[in-house]
Image: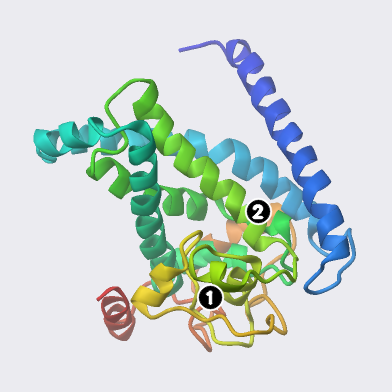
Amino acid sequence: MAEPSADLPGLAANVARVCVWLAILVAVFVPLERLFAARPQRLFRKGVGTDLAYYFLSSLVPAFLLAGPVGLLAWAVHRVVPAGVLEAAAGLPLGARVAAAFVAGEVGYYWGHRLSHVVPVLWRFHAIHHSAEHVDFLVNSRAHPVDMVFGRFCGLVPIYVLGLGGPAGLDGTLVPVLVVVLGTVWGFFIHANLRWRFGPLEWLVTTPAFHHWHHTKSGPINHNYASTLPWLDRLFGTHHLPAEFPADYGIRAKVPDGLIDQLLYPLVPDPPAPADPGHADPPAAPTAAGQREVAEAIR
């Protein structure tokens, strides 16, 4: 086992990288959100300190937690998926593999995200993200590590099953990494507090208006699950994008304000049943009716 001190330079480099990215994000989005705010708010609004802590947590922890499951996934794929499928995918040009992996990963993420809203045990963790009462670029990082790992893993499953995550080597490592990085960067944009609209482009790519409706508290809930490709929501009947922005954001359940309390919140036993799906904490396990809802949602 490596000595703890041997890992310190790598950890310090990662922290420095995360700090640089934060500086870039702040330099880009803070002025834009002051000039073109969809809903004006204070710079140091409620929960900004907690969300900054989530930024570092979400930037450093998920990759470590995903290493084991992704390694197991890659091992299983090479033993279950026909070799011809893997070889055909490996023979594609890098650009074609990245494009195919991007679409495949988005489909996987869509269904993982949708399940996080209808499966009670998953919603407990996902509710942390939706508890934000103000939506801006920093809210993109406000996610319980379990929720973030689940969402990313769902996106990676079809990439590896289709052979787009391999073979081993630079290209094989690069494709899923590019997909995750592109999705993460776009996530900051769609959470941004920007009133911009993009006309016909909103049919092709997600925008702040699209994703803000995913965070609505009192409007139509459980819509707009896609992170980058809104036509998936049109295809599966969950698209909602009117001309205006939502009147409010958040959930009806009371979620603690502090980071540690929020990380422990999904583990609290027997929270009250929800008044509406997605707006409060679900029971500890799906009821028969809940199981039927999940089955109907994924059909």
Q: Amino acid at mark 1?
A: Asp
Residue 40 horizontal/vertical position (percent): 86, 72
Query: Reading the chain from its start, which is encountered first: label 1 or label 2?
Result: 2
The one of 180 and 202 positioned closer to us in this rendering:
202
Residue 41 horizontal/vertical position (percent): 86, 69
Residue 1 horizontal/vertical position (percent): 45, 12
Q: Secondary structure at mark 1?
A: loop
Q: Which residue is mark 2?
A: 188
The way the protein has been coloured in the rendering is rainbow
Circle 1 crowding by C-alpha within 10 Å: few under 14, some 14–19, many from 20: many
Q: Quadrant of residue 113?
A: bottom left
Q: Quadrant of residue 90?
A: top left
Residue at 71% from the left image edge and 57% from the top image edge: 137
Q: Quadrant of residue 107?
A: bottom left
Is residue 69 at least partly visible in the picture? no
Cα–Cα span, label 1 and label 2: 26 Å
Rendered view: 248 above or below 261: below
Q: Which residue is mark 1?
A: 281
Rendered view: 268 above or below 155: below
Residue at 31% from the left image edge and 32% from the top image edge: 93
48 left or right of 167 in image: right
Residue at 37% from the left image edge and 26% from the top image edge: 171
Q: Secondary structure at mark 2?
A: helix
Residue 251 horizontal/vertical position (percent): 63, 77
Please say if the residues under marks 1 and 2 sit with CB atoms less than 8 Å apart. Answer: no
User: Can you name the residue that lies furthest to the front here?
Assistant: 200
The one of 246 and 255 positioned closer to us in this rendering:
246
Is residue 134 at least partly visible in the picture? yes
45 left or right of 188 in image: right
Instruction: Point out which mark residue 99 bears.
Output: none
